[in-house]
Image: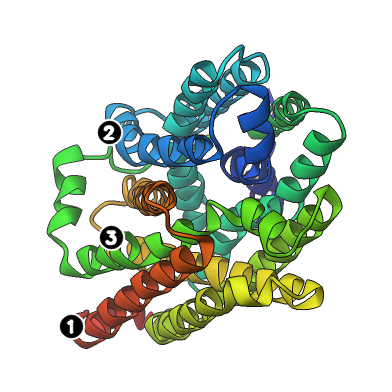
Amino acid sequence: MTRLNFSRTTVLAFFMISTFAIGMVEYVVTGLLTQFAEDLNVEVSTTGLLLSVYAISVAVFGPLLRMITIKFPPKPLLIGLMAVFILSNIIAATAANFEILLVSRLLSAAMHAPFFGLTMSIAYNISAPEKRTSAIAAVQGGLTIAVMLGVPFGSLLGGMFEWRYVFWFIVFLGVIALIGLILVTPNERPAEAPNLKKELSVFKNKNVLMVLAIIVFGFSGVFTAYTFNEPMLREYAGFGVPGVTVGMFCFGLGAVIGNFASGRIRPSLLTERLMAALVMLAIVLVLFTFFLQFTILAFVICFFFGMGTFGTTPLLNSKIIIAGREAPSLSGTIAASIFNLANCIGATLGSMLLNFGFNYTMITIVAAGIIVFGLALTVLTHKVEDKELYAS
């Protein structure tokens, strides 16, 4: 049989389609919270669990699944993970109650971190040194494009029909992604079989631990606010379905621009640019609900919220993968998992604050405070990290 060799661009394109589908599943619920609450007879604050449960499942089950499958060849593992993704979304589309919808989220979340870890690792390995940061940003780019197009489209589709159609659309995307993975993924094994004990030693690496701390204790502030983006657009801006859709699109447009702009940053400048992105995020969150009260400014602030959020993630992902050289198989999964742990912390905190009687303005200010703490950790990281790692 003739072996087909696909270009790096083709491989990255299908990885982006795959991560687009996964990203849409993760974030599209933020534009459907009101519909879930009405159709499944739960409070809006309860629907926030669809984000926090997803995130904690990625953070907990993702690394466990990757450790169990660490010796599996990448290509069949990616295909198997995508099959789980398709099944989970069929369950979501046919969910009879909120509990079954939560179970579907657990299933799709379990494959999230290993899938992102594998695709980032493959993208990194098939790229020249000067293109590795951009390769990671390309994989992440599927997720950010999902935020730009998938989330507002899902909000529109759910608003015009019902939320179940959104999950059927995601099933369709998953099937396309599965076919692409079968056709283009390089069928290669690492020269040396992964050693789990050696890879777990990454948790003794101070450079990696500092970045993980920034994500958990700083980036979690993003989701404290973002979880309730759709209700805030309705309450403060007075938007219906069309306005919410445009607001979500503006967030996603900013996310895509921020993501690919960060992908162009040289490794030696990652930490400095990270500090700038966190400063921007803190300012945006302080101003968020005040700007929402004016239609044009509402779209502008959504744009900058997305730009700051997803301009930050490629920087942090790159720092983990570059610094965690002793864990080539696990570092990408760890990165995806820790981001979702931060998402869970943020979404849970936001839900708790809402239940305690905090209004959305107070919640966004708390979120800004968390980002500022992450900025302080980044400044400390810049002083103590091994800068030689990022010089190449």
Q: Earlier in the sequence, mark 1 or mark 3?
A: 3
Q: Nearer the viewer, mark 3 or mark 2?
A: 2
- Is residue 128 something one can see in this rendering? no
Secondary structure at numbered mark 3:
loop
Spatial distance from mark 3 to mark 2, Cα to Cα? 17 Å
For label 2, the SS is helix
Q: Which residue lies under the disc numbered 2?
A: 67
How crowded pointer 3 is (Cα within 10 Å; few <14, some 14-19, many 20+) is rated as some
Few, some or many C-alpha atoms within 10 Å of disc 2 (few <14, some 14-19, many ≥20)? Answer: some
Left or right of 203 on screen, residue 35: right
Q: Are marks 1 and 2 in contact (CB under 8 Å)?
A: no
Judge whether 312 appears above or below 166 on screen.
below
The mark nearer the N terminus, 3 or 2, is 2
Instruction: Please give the residue where the numbered disc 3 appears in the rendered image.
Output: 325
Q: What residue type is disc 1 on?
A: Val
Q: Position of residue 33 (x, y in %)?
A: 62, 39
Q: CA distance from mark 1 to mark 3?
A: 18 Å
Percent across and percent down for residue 28 are 65, 42
Q: Earlier in the sequence, mark 1 or mark 2?
A: 2
**Left or right relative to 290: residue 323:** left
Q: What is the secondary structure assignment of the residue under circle 1? A: helix
Label of residue 384 in the image: 1
Classed neighbour count for the residue bearing mark 1: other residues with Cα under 10 Å, few (<14), some (14–19), many (≥20)? few
Q: Quadrant of residue 284?
A: bottom right
